[in-house]
Image (cartoon, grey):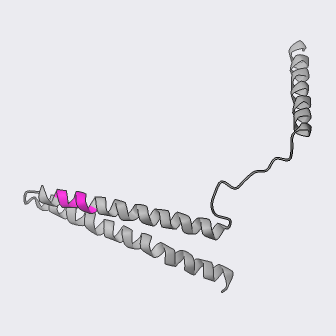
């Protein structure tokens, strides 16, 4: 019982001190940490970032699959794996590059413009 009364007094003191400091301070202004003011700008920035990342990753995957192709030593399974890696990397890149168009299309459908 004594502990709950002590805890209540402690919480009341914290609350009152918060009110005192809040009333003494000037108006708090929270600035936007992002450079984008609209949701459309944010989505476009995310798509551009992902597109640039996909370009880098695709290049690395193609180089890696080339390494697999060279080190396959005629093994048909390894050659097939290297070809599939290139194919999947290019399909993924095509999807990422088409994302801007898809988002623009969805935006036009939603906005009705």
Locate residue 91 relative to residue 32 in the image: left or right.
left
Residue 12, how many percent across, how many down?
A: 91, 27
Whether 20 is among the magenta residues is no
Kindly give the residue lying farthest to the bottom in the view shown: 113
Which residue is depicted at the point 49% across and 67% down? 48
Which residue is depicted at the point 56% across and 69% down? 44
Magenta residues span: 62-68
Which residue is depicted at the point 92% across and 33% down? 20
Kindly give the residue lying farthest to the left in the view shown: 74
Task: Between residue 49 and residue 96, name the one nearer to us.
Answer: 49
Kindly give the residue lying farthest to the front in the view shown: 26
Residue 34, how many percent across, how many down?
A: 63, 57
The kind of secondary structure the magenta stretch mainly shows is helix
Residue 76, how many percent across, how many down?
A: 12, 62
Residue 103, how many percent across, how many down?
A: 55, 75
Q: How many marks?
A: 0
Q: Quadrant of the C terminus?
A: bottom right
Q: Quadrant of residue 71?
A: bottom left
Q: Quadrant of residue 94?
A: bottom left
Kindly give the residue lying farthest to the top in the view shown: 2
When the figure is inspected, residue 106 is found, relative to residue 79, above or below; the finding is below
Locate residue 67 relative to residue 87 in the image: left or right.
left
Whether 63 is among the magenta residues is yes
Locate residue 97 relative to residue 106 in the image: left or right.
left
When the figure is inspected, residue 113 is found, relative to residue 79, above or below; the finding is below
When the figure is inspected, residue 105 is found, relative to residue 22, above or below; the finding is below
Task: Between residue 65 and residue 39, name the one nearer to us.
Answer: 39
Task: Between residue 33 and residue 46, name the one nearer to us.
Answer: 33
């Amino acid at each position: 019982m004594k502990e709950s009364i002590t805890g209540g007094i402690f919480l009341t003191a914290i609350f009152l001190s918060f009110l005192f400091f809040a009333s003494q301070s000037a108006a708090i202004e929270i600035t936007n940490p992002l450079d984008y003011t609209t949701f459309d700008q944010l989505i476009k920035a995310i798509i551009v970032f992902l597109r640039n990342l996909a370009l880098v990753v695709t290049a690395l995957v193609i180089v890696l699959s080339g390494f697999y192709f060279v080190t396959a030593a005629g093994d048909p399974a390894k050659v097939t794996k290297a070809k599939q890696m290139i194919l999947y990397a290019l399909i993924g890149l095509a999807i990422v590059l088409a994302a801007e168009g898809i988002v623009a299309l969805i935006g036009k459908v939603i906005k009705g413009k």
